[in-house]
Amino acid sequence: MWRATRKGLMAHKFRLVSTYIAVLLGVAFVAGTLVLSDTLQHTFDNLFTEVTKGTDVSVRSKAAFTSNDDSGSGASDREAVPASLVSTVEKVDGVKVVTGNVQGYAALIDKDGKAIIPQGPPTIGVSYSGVEEMDPLTFTAGNGPRAPNEIAIDRRTATDHHFAVGDRVSVLLQDGTKQFDLVGIFKFGEADNLAGATLTAFYPSTAQQEFNKVGKWDTIDVAAEPGVSSTELRDRIAGALPKQYEAVTGQTVADEASNQVKQGLGFFTTLLLVFAAIALFTGSFIIFNTFSIIVAQRIREMALLRALGASRRQVTRSVLAEAVAVGLVAAVSGLVLGLGFAKGLTALFDAIGMDIPGGGLVLKTRTWVTSIVLGVVVTTVAALIPARKAGRVPPVAAMRETDIEPASSMRRRLVSGGLVLGFGLLLLFTGLFGSVKNGISLVGLGCMLAFIGISMLAPVVARPLAGAIGRPLPRLFGTSGRLAQQNAMRNPRRTASTASALIIGLGLVGAVAVMAASIKTSVTDLVNRNIKADYVLATKSFGNFSPKLAESLNVTPGIDAASGIRIGEVQIDGTKKQLQAVDPATIDKLIRIDMKSGAVSALGNNQLLVSEKIAKDKGWKRGDTVTMKFAKTGDKTFLVGGVYENNQFLGDVTTGISTFEANFSNPLDFVVVVKGAPGVSSSELRSALDKAVKPFPNIEVRTRAEYVQYTQDQVNQMLTLVYALLMLAIVIALIGIMNTMALSVFERTREIGLARAVGMSRRQVRRMIRWESVVVSLLGAVVGLVVGVGFGWALVRALADEGIQSLTIPFGTLVGFLVFAGVAGMGAAIFPARRAARLDVLTAIAAE
Amino acid sequence: MTATATTTRLAAHTEDLVKVYGEGDTQVRALDGVTVGFDSGVFTAIMGPSGSGKSTLMHCAAGLDTITSGHVYLADTDLTALNDKDLTRLRRDRVGFIFQAFNLLPTLTALENITLPLDIAGRKPDKAWLDSVIDTVGLRDRLNHRPTELSGGQQQRVAAARALASRPEIIFADEPTGNLDSRSGSEVLSFMRRSVKEMGQTIVMVTHDPVAASYADRVVFLADGRIVDEMLDPTAEHVLDRMKKFGQ
């Protein structure tokens, strides 16, 4: 029996190519993502351990909660400690040496006068003590700064921007640009930079001064005497500290830093895994379809085995064994491909500025076990139904001349498919609109079930729909057109399951397209409605910058008003929330705030303004007192001064700048909005602005229209990424179409031979196959896009509270996808069509 | 021959076998109360015009198809009392088949096809028996060939050898020469004849060819789902004459 299975598998291996590819790509995606994520984590763990090397204990202020503040340091927002604390720490028994450190904003200016701002990672300035025991830097040229006007920078930045020791370098600091002498270039252990950040090391007193921390340190770092463990020293130091300070080990600091990067990485990994899951899910339809066709084609073989005494289970198992074998081989090759994929991506990270030091890829046991189990399980599960069908082939089928088409009733399919679809939609809508905990996983599961339901229902509509789509074919291409149309209609079950994979791909693409278009219109509407300002000033990647800019703009002639907007994180009822801060004196002129109650001026009196949305959620109204927890200053109580209509720019909770400054150490703006004075021409305003931002080379000046364009570009960028990730699912779907066409050609050998014998040309045969494939593709695309628009609509509705108010259906784009699907379908048929045309007439007719 | 038939026991028999296909208006009574026995060690041919129910009779007798009413016995076993699992085991261990076409798995060699039922059952073939079967078939030099490399007659002889290899109590053959030219057909039929004579095999063969029927010891005639006649030690001429009556 196993011999028959094995030999059957070898003989039919070309039929399983599509299954192989589908599993291969899906598994490669999963394996690549896991390897990449593990490799990056490993890299960061090493990196941060390296950075805190030699530091046994670190002393700092306590934080009410840990979060990212936006100073870019990656550390929690904490009060600085007085420099006088150093002597307290020094006196503790077992302390060998103590240094104070500060961190702050410092962007280097390249030789063309442009600020060096990495996409994402921060621009960090640090003090450099030069204490040998705790020096994380390895100098590759020169040495650390030994005088107030000296700096050292990381090697990656130096290489990328052609800096060398001895250069005079401009550095953008909080209060403007200053010049320094570059005296050293360093790396961290093996890495040329710190997870993509640019790093500038300053002389300690310079750092204190430039970061506005004169007489203070962010942390006091301690190296222990030999023989004193870091935990022991930590406890001893903690005993000597006033209660608002804490002592932690160097390892804790490294872990905290590493964990923050990991959180970001975790999101990225999850995103990739979601798309990998989509690819595998699509692939499972191809596998199901392939095995269904194989079983149908080998029905007499199965029947023969049954007649010769093979049990149902033996036949089922022999089909499943094929699935396991293919799954296993594909999963192993997928794992190998995944390693290559991860390698390629680390190269990509390197190309965008993040140095990944050697040490190679990290392949954990979890990764290869997951990959192989996933590949085998997906293949086997997808082949389960076809395999059971194979087991149910009656032995008499071996002796009947005609093939028996298993005729499970359409009505039963309608009921069961409808139930699955209905249940899927129920989950989907509960996830989207209900207030449940795991909304997002419900949405995912609901989507999956809905797609399964749709593919179960698809055969019901496949025949009429294929007929309608193929209607112009007979007129256009005569007999081959008619045959193409009819072939697409003759086996609605097969047509539908072939198209199913494409339904999923284009369903998701359609939903994303609708959502993106809606976001774009909504954002444009909101910006136009909410901003009164003429200009929006921000860095390229919306990083933070000096508040000096807003100050200087407010005294620039020709400018009516300018307000910096700051954001910080607070905790309200235990959950993190973003807090906005604006200048109460000018904000009314710059941003339209529709007050439902209270007045904007309340911001000046240390009060809060809150959005309608959060007011409704929390039951707040004007005059209530609200408690917010700040990382630096702990719980603070505020009066709600008013409620405004939901506003894209202000978010949910807004406060005045002075309140913000009292509770955050971050003094930086992330955006400045500017309005010209009445009577000032736009070109005058522009040149005034250009002049004002000259000392801030990291700032881009955008008009309102340019700002709208910028936000649209952001959405488009995201959209391109999502399309690229979904492309894999679509490619798998097209491979499925190619496979079905090839198997159909194989199955219709006699038919094609007959058509050729009675005079059909090779060209007509090719045309017939190609157009059948186009009809199937378009069928998938039409159903997929209809489903996708529905999903998109639901998503947009669900996100109405987040500011996406208008539903836009991008018809042009959708038609573009249809055309793409048609062309791709034609492309998928090239190989099967050629094969069909090459059939020798006589052998085709003689074939069994 | 009559003497032999009466002294040996029945390898298989049916009692009042009825097989109805379809429902209502489209209902077809393929077998209408057939009671017939197939003696052990005898080569029986079932004949009849198209649509007489001869293939259906064979399918039912072999446990390949379900029946509407009546009983089917293989030796003393009542097939109607068996579930799918038991029927499968019965086919595997006690019955052999030769079909008109598609007898062999194209991916296996001739030898592998011959031992396929034994492989399915997970049994080791009896070497001596297998050798004698292969010698009787006369295909020793072709054992490692694939079905596509064999002629039609050779393929059917491999199918016959496969049926014999597991030493079944009875072999059912469905138009085994239907797709063959007369020379290849006689090769196969002679082999079947020999296996009955020399090895004591029981064979039931459905055919519409009087020449093929002449190789049998006994011919049973079927028309409209009923047994209408039988003939012992048939010759092609006698059978043809009998068949001509159906046309009238």
Image: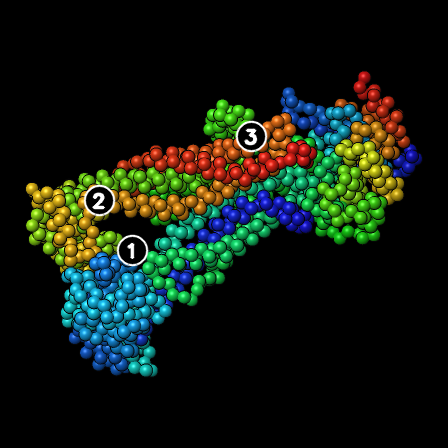
Q: Residue at x 20, y 54 (%)?
A: A699
Residue A313, can we see it?
no
Residue A322, can we see it?
yes
Q: Is residue A208 left or right of residue A472?
A: left
Q: Which tag, 1 or 3, sits closer to the chain's start?
A: 1
Which element carries disc 2, helix, strand or loop?
helix
Q: Is residue A681 left or right of residue A507?
A: left
Q: Which tag, 1 or 2, sits closer to the chain's start?
A: 1
Quadrant housing residue A548: bottom left
Marks 2 and 3 in Cβ contact (< 8 Å):
no
Amino acid type indicated by mark 2: Glu
Amino acid type indicated by mark 1: Gln
Say which chain tag 3 marks: A
Gap between marks 1 and 2, in whole Å? 20 Å
Report the mark closest to the observer, 2 or 3.
3
Gap between marks 2 and 3, in whole Å? 54 Å
Gap between marks 1 and 3, in whole Å? 54 Å
Say which chain tag 1 marks: A
Amino acid type indicated by mark 3: Gln
Would you name the residue on which mark 1 appears? A119
Residue nearest the viewer, comparing A406 with A125: A125
As displayed, is residue B121 above or below residue A185? above
Would you name the residue on which mark 3 appears? A764
**Dot 2, how many residues are within 10 Å of its Cα: few (below 14), some (14-19), or many (20+)?**
few
Q: Are the residues under badges 2 and 3 in a single subunit?
A: yes
Q: Residue at x 18, y 42 (%)?
A: A530
State the image coordinates of residue A352 (x, y, percent, origin top left): 34, 57
As displayed, is residue A213 above or below residue A327? below
State the image coordinates of residue A564 (x, y, percent, origin top left): 15, 52
